[in-house]
Image (cartoon, helix red, strand yellow):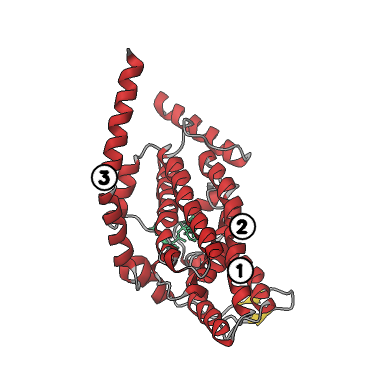
Amino acid sequence: MTVQAVIEQEKLAQFEAKIENEIKIEPNDWMPEDYRKHLIRQISQHAHSEVIGMQPEGNWITRAPSLRSKKILLAKIQDEGGHGLYLYAAAETLGVSREQFISWLHEGKAKYASVFNYPTLNWADIGAIGWLVDGAAITNQVSLQRTSYGPYSRAMVRICKEESFHQRQGYEIMWRMMEGTKDQQRMAQDALNRWWWPSLMMFGPHDTDSPRSEKAIQWKIKRESNDRLREKFINKTIPQAELIGLKVPDPELRLNEDGTYQHGDINWDEFYAVINGNGPCNKQRLQHHIKAHQDGAWVRETAAIHQQKMNNHGKH
Ligand code: FAQ
């Protein structure tokens, strides 16, 4: 064996020992190239989801039914933009620039969460997104707080604090609508009917059909499997629905003897159509992002000139 190969083997052993002993991997630590690539993909797609996820809710800022609800929605959407920022910053520590991440998104090479390709048709959808979509996101993100890559893990800790507030604001909207008129109750049930299945799809394919899971779990990037997280979400969400008089749109739903739930079949054809660019709003979401990015070019250019001046000033 060459000296170089021995050194490489030693580095790998040190990396594996850190993973084994729950010591976080930090940006300047040696890491296998596949681990780095896996993180670049997952964290940047997570960041894109936060930012594209602002669009369906942003659609309702001007039509929020009260000043209170408008203020809450504005703050919530702003939080999501902030989450995108933390996550892009975490992903950039792996040696890829923000411009590159955005190009991959615009070229259709990077994904974002499937659920944001569905339309928000009325105010109850804003409740359903907060309650279900943020509820699903936080179920996943709580486990990602223990992910093995330090910057990703620390971003998740901050994000989870805000996401739990988002989940409650969404549930509050649904609960108030269920206390309202018959029409409001119908709107809330209709929103649940339309957002339930896309929320379950957020957790990704079943474990047996999830090509990325094995390595992700071995490297402790993912701490729980797609199906396990989906089950956790279902088990905590169904009692919340029942409490306010909503019915989950799953005729095959069964309560197991141990108090957990078994759900009916998920429409995976729909899932794959959406993640491959053919959902109801994919084109609209991407076009909106591209336009906003182009419209914001002058801000980035001005900030870069300012930064350059500051750097030059510092040199004198
Ligand atoms: N949507 O082998 P797996 C939020 C892709 S944040 C689109 O199971 P993996 C906050 C997957 O990328 C929500 N694509 O993959 C908010 C892979 O394709 P690739 C975002 C999906 O990575 C709330 C292929 O299928 N959260 O909502 C989806 O092990 C309200 C095979 O799948 C995160 O991103 C999907 N649902 O598991 C904002 C959490 N599922 O990349 C605004 C971090 C799977 O090989 C408003 N990410 N795919 O081409 C993860 O935990 C994982 O990446 C999973 C997928 C669980 C999403």
Q: Position of residue 218 (x, y in %)?
A: 54, 49
Q: Position of residue 296 (x, y in %)?
A: 29, 47
Q: Which residue does the numbered mark 1 point to in the structure image?
A: 171
What mark, if any, has residue 164 been given in the picture? 2
Which is more toward the observer, 32 or 290? 290
Mark 2 vs 1, N-terminal side: 2
Q: Secondary structure at mark 1?
A: helix
- The amino acid type found where label 1 is placed reads Tyr
User: Residue drawn at (26%, 42%), measured in percent from left and top?
Assistant: 298
Give the quarter of the image for residue 297.
top left
Quarter of the picture containing the C terminus is top left
Residue 205 position (above or below residue 310): below
Can you name the residue that lies furthest to the right here?
258
What mark, if any, has residue 297 been given in the picture? 3
Residue 197 position (above or below residue 8): below
Question: Whereabouts is ligand 1, in terms of quadrant?
Answer: bottom left
Q: On the picture, is 123 further left or further right than 256?
A: left
Mark 3 vs 2, N-terminal side: 2
Q: On the picture, is 144 further left or further right than 89?
A: right
